[in-house]
Every structure is written in structure tokens, then in C-alpha cells.
Image: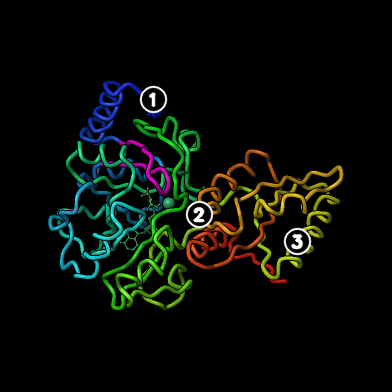
């Protein structure tokens, strides 16, 4: 485990990146930073190596992995790439965008969890790109958390979940986006967003107006067609249950205040997640209430960047219950609410 900081000697950095690539070459697992969240990588073309990822994370076998590439030559891995998908990748790669395409046989069943499709992404993080480039093969990488927990956005959180379970952990800075990549499925017509993320629907539609997004695409159990298998599992969850309160600002504050007081009376330790502007509204006398700000309510980028870390902090503080304000579901806010709702098991009170 080692963190590559900005001030590291170039020769040392070189050695560490080469060591990471070497672990991958030998079929091992390496956790590394990306701009979305930290990932746990293995050689995507090596079934046994990929098996190591599933083992380390305790990941369900039917949940396919995204492969990470460092260049735009996808012909070896993907079949029948639609022109618009190409355009989208040209526009937003490297970046928080995963495109689902028809896979070629070189991609093992283990990696795609038996599907005939494959998710591909080029991360916008020099350390990740450099590791992939050195391996010279795509790197399969899910988020570097134990299955079910919020994805790690820092080196420390990554170590917390995976220390002793993987062959190497390479750290970098905090993930700048903070939520997993946007997934667009180009094997259906019209193409669909299976998971909202850093590339918003508006940004996607600039390139391809036919791309559709409905919250229901990200849920299992409806008959809306193919979805990301991973979205059906309880996800992003801290240990304490979360309740989201949604509605007009003053009513939300009032409702949360009432709930906090009730829970505290029952001897519960309560976590409150809300825009930083609201800190003064959630001050309580002598009780066990802990406020964590999720950045400005006018800056969804901050909410995205801070969300998973906040959820994990409530665990550190052993909160019994977490009350969260909803955020506006516009632009990146849609992705923030998607993760928050899943973390809450869709336990949402409208006021
Ligand atoms: O930002 C990200 O995408 C991060 C970083 C590490 O790159 N990775 C990530 O991977 O979030 P993971 O495994 O935690 O989430 C991948 C999601 C899962 O919900 C999975 O079911 C879905 O993508 N997925 C992968 N391949 C798919 C496919 N062929 N068809 C539909 N969904 C797929
Ligand atoms: Mg994940």
C-alpha cells in the first residue's frame, strides 16, 4: 500500500507504477485511484485474475465488470460500435463515461458475467491511465469497496475496505467527481442511461439527443428492459438506515428537526446530511446529533464529491440513524439523488 503524492520523486513514481503493472501482469489485483471513485483492477482478459476481484470484494458472481482502457482502439474488444457511441467517447473520454457495447470473444465470460455485452471506460486520472498503458491490456475494475458499501473516494477509505484482501493498493488524491461513471447502454435502441453520473443527460444529449434516462432504468424488477445488474443490489449503504426528506426547504428543515428531537429522546445518535448552508439550522441542545455538510446546495459537484465520504463518516461516528435532505434532481443532482435514494433503500418522506 502506498500513496503517490504530488511531490514524489519521478524515479520512485516510475518504480511504483511499474510494480503495479507487474502485479497485474502476474494475474494479481491492484486498487488505484480514478476521477470517479477508486477502482480494484485486474487484467480484464485473464479469467483467474478477474476472479480475484470478485473474491476480494465479496461481489455477486452475476455482476459484470467495466473494462478500463488507455486508448481509443476498441475493435479488439467491442463489436458493431454505433457511430454515435464513438462520437460520445471521442467527446467525453477520458472521463466519467462508460459505454456498453457488444463484446468480442476475447473478453472472458467471467469479466462480463456471462453477458454478451461489455462496459468500457477511459478514466481521466493519470495514475490509472499509466498503469493500464503499462499493462498493455484492458483493466477490469469495479469500485474498490467491499460489496454494498459506499465506493471509496480516498486512499484511506480504499485501504479501510481492501487492506489484506488485494495484492497492491496505489493511492492518489481524492476522486474529483466522487460518484461512479455514467453508464450508457448502446446495445439497445434508443440508447439508455443505466446509471447517472458525472456526464449528465444534458451533456449526453448534446452529442446524441436520442439517449434516454428514466430513474426506473436504474432499478431492477420492472420490465423496462436490460439494466445494469449491479443496480439491483443494496448499494452505497452505511450501516445506519437513512431517511431522505424531500420538499419545500422550510418544511424539510422543520421535519428533520422534529425527527432529530424524537430520535434523540429515544437515546439515538442521529446523523444529519444537508447542504452546508443549513449548518446553523441543525444545532440541538445537549443531544447526540451530528451534522455533516455536503457542500453548497447550489453546487451539485460538491454534493457529488462529498456524498460517499459523508456516508462513511456517519459509520465512523456510530450513528444509529441518518436523516438527509434531498437535493435537486437537475444535472449532476440526478446522480447524487440516485445514489442517496439507493443508500436509503428508497426510504423517502415527502413534506
Ligand atoms: O466510475 C466507475 O465506473 C468505477 C471506476 C472504478 O471506474 N467503476 C464502477 O464499477 O463503478 P462497478 O463494478 O462498481 O459498477 C459497474 C456497474 C454495475 O452496476 C454493473 O452491473 C454495470 O456497471 N455493468 C457492467 N457491465 C455491464 C453490462 N455489460 N451491461 C449492463 N451493466 C453493466
Ligand atoms: Mg460499485
Name the residue rendered at 27%, 52% in the picture. 111
SS category of the residue bearing label 2: helix
Compute the Cα span from label 2 to label 3: 22 Å
Give the residue at mark 1.
Answer: 7
Where is the C terminus found, in terms of image quarters?
A: bottom right
**Closer to the eye: label 1 or 3:** 1
Compute the Cα span from label 1 to label 3: 44 Å
Compute the Cα span from label 1 to label 2: 27 Å
SS category of the residue bearing label 1: loop
Q: Quadrant of residue 287?
A: top right
Neighbour tally class for label 3: few under 14, some 14-19, many 20 plus, Cα within 10 Å:
many
Give the residue at mark 2.
Answer: 301
How many marks on residues? 3
Q: Which residues are magenta?
A: 29-42
Percent from the top left, x then y, of residue 274? 66, 54
Q: Pointer 2 and pointer 3: residues touching (CB < 8 Å)?
A: no
Give the residue at mark 3.
Answer: 253
Q: Is 264 above or below relative to 163?
A: below
Amino acid at each position: 500500500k502506498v500513496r503517490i503524492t504530488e511531490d514524489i520523486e519521478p524515479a520512485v513514481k516510475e518504480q511504483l507504477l511499474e510494480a503495479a503493472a507487474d502485479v497485474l501482469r502476474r494475474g494479481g489485483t491492484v486498487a488505484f485511484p480514478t476521477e470517479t471513485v477508486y477502482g480494484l483492477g485486474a487484467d480484464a482478459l485473464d479469467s483467474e485474475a478477474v476472479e480475484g476481484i470478485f473474491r476480494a470484494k465479496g461481489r455477486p458472481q452475476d455482476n459484470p465488470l467495466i473494462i478500463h482502457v488507455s486508448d481509443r482502439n476498441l475493435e479488439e474488444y467491442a463489436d458493431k460500435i454505433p457511430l454515435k457511441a464513438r462520437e460520445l467517447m471521442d467527446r467525453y473520454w477520458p472521463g466519467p463515461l462508460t459505454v456498453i457495447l457488444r463484446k468480442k470473444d476475447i473478453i472472458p465470460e467471467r469479466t462480463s458475467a456471462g453477458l454478451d455485452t461489455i462496459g468500457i471506460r477511459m478514466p481521466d486520472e493519470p495514475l490509472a491511465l499509466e498503469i493500464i498503458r503499462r499493462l498493455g491490456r484492458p483493466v477490469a475494475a469495479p469500485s474498490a469497496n467491499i460489496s454494498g458499501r459506499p465506493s471509496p473516494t480516498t486512499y484511506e477509505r480504499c485501504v479501510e475496505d481492501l487492506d489484506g484482501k488485494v495484492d497492491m493498493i496505489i493511492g492518489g488524491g481524492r476522486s474529483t467527481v466522487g460518484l461512479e461513471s455514467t453508464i450508457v447502454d448502446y446495445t439497445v435502441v434508443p440508447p439508455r442511461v443505466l446509471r447517472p453520473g458525472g456526464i449528465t443527460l444534458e451533456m449526453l444529449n448534446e452529442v446524441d439527443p436520442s439517449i434516454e434516462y428514466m430513474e426506473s432504468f436504474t432499478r431492477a424488477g420492472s420490465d423496462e428492459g436490460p439494466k445494469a445488474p449491479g443496480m439491483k443490489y443494496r448499494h452505497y449503504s452505511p450501516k445506519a438506515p437513512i431517511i431522505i426528506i424531500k420538499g419545500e426547504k422550510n418544511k424539510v428543515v422543520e421535519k428533520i428537526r422534529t425527527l432529530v428531537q424524537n430520535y434523540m429522546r429515544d437515546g439515538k445518535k442521529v446523523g444529519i446530511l444537508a447542504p452546508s448552508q443549513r449548518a446553523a439550522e441543525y444545532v440541538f441542545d445537549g443531544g447526540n446529533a451530528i451534522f455533516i455538510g455536503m457542500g453548497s446546495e447550489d453546487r451539485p459537484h460538491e454534493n457529488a464529491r462529498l456524498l460517499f465520504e459523508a456516508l462513511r463518516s456517519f459509520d465512523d461516528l456510530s450513528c444509529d440513524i441518518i436523516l438527509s435532505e434531498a437535493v435537486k434532481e437537475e444535472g449532476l443532482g440526478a446522480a447524487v439523488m440516485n445514489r442517496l435514494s439507493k443508500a436509503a433503500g428508497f426510504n423517502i418522506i415527502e413534506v
